Image (cartoon, rainbow, N blue to C red):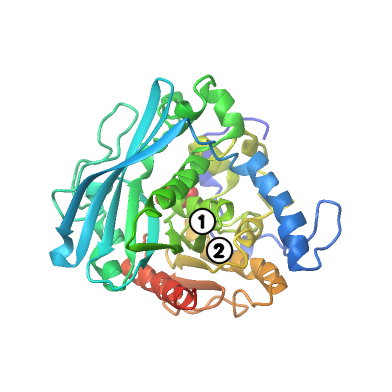
Amino acid sequence: MTEKRTLQEIFSEINYEESKVPRHDMLSALIMNNGQKVANAWEWMNQRRPEIMDFYRQEVFGELPSLPGTMSHEVLSCKSDALCDQAIRKEIRITFTQGSRSRSWIMLLYIPKNAVGPVPVTLGLNFKGNHTTTLEDDVLMTGKNCAGEWVDPQRGVQCERWEFAKVIGRGFASATVCYHDIFPDFACDEAWQQSIYSVAYPDLTPAQLHEKHSAISAWAWGLSRMLDVLSSEAKIDCRKAMVTGHSRLGKTSLWAGANDSRFQVVVSNDSGHGGAALFRRCLGENIEALVTAFPHWFVSAFAKYAQADANLQFDQNFLLALIAPRPLCIGSATQDLWADPRGEFLAGKYASEVYRLFGVNGMPGDEPPAADVNIYGEVSYHIRSGAHNILWQDWEHYLSVAGKVFEQTI
Ligand code: GCU
């Protein structure tokens, strides 16, 4: 990138027309850095996959934080008749301490009350605080901005995105933490200073941290720490864990799934560019828009790809392939052109070449299904009618995929 342009200039050139998508062939994730093609699952897991992981660590999302000094957790509340007596609700404070620095998050957890054995669990981060995910009015408020204020003090404003009662009804436990509490989602030095990185690396400046890390890596790491804590819950079977995320948090769930194979099912909902969408199609958001509006989501090195989308030597089917052979669900929405639904579908289809190394098919079909038709495979896909969001219709698809997978898991 030569000169920094304003978001207005960048937005004015965004392409939304399929006819203007540049001709491009699929970039195969199977071609190794030395030009040879991966021949089997062993070579993928031991040679090519590590190359792609290194690439994403150096050029895109950076390294996950290392564990600061100590991690502990404490149950702050336990309510045995939550959600009209259907659930046990817990709030668990997770604290990281190193020297004089510490940082805590509160995880909100619902567990089906009448389950016979340990249940599967779905984990995800929320945008606006735990109290915004539910109408239960005694849930602790979480989610602060860099000035220490609530990002959104209004209770229940995002409850349509969580639907805990219905998730519980399907036999799943559900856990969430507000992402701001792990890394406040703002493009400023204070955000780095108040993030988990400041506990893990107290001597590094925001600029130094940004060379190696990103907010998305901090959030992805947070999801793994949630799972660590959930392992001490007797009523939850953490071998059956599904990680979900919407939009920027869908980019995050993919990166979390790539880094932590305990996430047995990985869900990307409307994750768009930097998530499931192919950059090289140049439809909807592009890298320049991403690194200008949200530089902290990526390592600083990623900025050099701005305006180079069409000519990249990698694409997001590489990121999706890192999940293989574990089940992956990709969800899009018909009105969400910014996230390029077709590009999200195609990335899943292209990533399927890696699933085939494991003797499974990945995503069935060559063209996206009609709106509101779910397609099932090791890579599942659906495109919901409507706007950029995560709604019960999306959850239903993800839970039914996970339900089938976990039934077969011993
Ligand atoms: C912006 C951003 C997207 C992101 C979305 C979200 O629209 O450009 O990349 O996915 O926010 O997280 O809601």
- Residue 328: x %, y % from top left: 53, 67
Where residue 242 sits, quadrant-wise, is: bottom left
**356 lies above or below 281:** below
Q: What residue would you read off at disc 2? A: 344
Q: Nearer the viewer, residue 224 or 51?
A: 224
At mark 2, the secondary structure is helix
Q: Amino acid at mark 1?
A: Gly
Where residue 233 sits, quadrant-wise, is: bottom left
Q: Residues within 10 Å of mark 1 (few under 14, many from 20)?
A: many
Q: Residue at x 48, y 54 (%)?
A: 253
- Residue 285: x %, y % from top left: 53, 51
Q: Is mark 1 within 8 Å of ligand 1?
A: yes
Q: Residue at x 69, y 45 (%)?
A: 54
Is any part of residue 385 visible from this angle?
no
Is residue 349 rendered to the left or right of residue 30?
A: left
**294 lies above or below 382:** above
Is residue 274 rendered to the left or right of residue 389?
A: right
Q: Are marks 1 and 2 in contact (CB under 8 Å)?
A: yes
- Residue 213: x %, y % from top left: 56, 35
At mark 1, the secondary structure is loop
**296 lies above or below 405:** above
Q: Which mark is residue 221?
A: none
Q: Residue at x 39, y 71 (%)?
A: 399
Is residue 82 rendered to the left or right of residue 410?
A: left
Is residue 168 rendered to the left or right of residue 196?
A: left
As measured in the structure, the alpha-carbon distance from the residue carrying label 1 to the one carrying label 2 is 7 Å
Q: What residue would you read off at disc 1? A: 272
Q: Amino acid at mark 2?
A: Glu
Q: Nearer the viewer, residue 164 or 330?
A: 164
Q: Residue at x 34, y 52 (%)?
A: 176
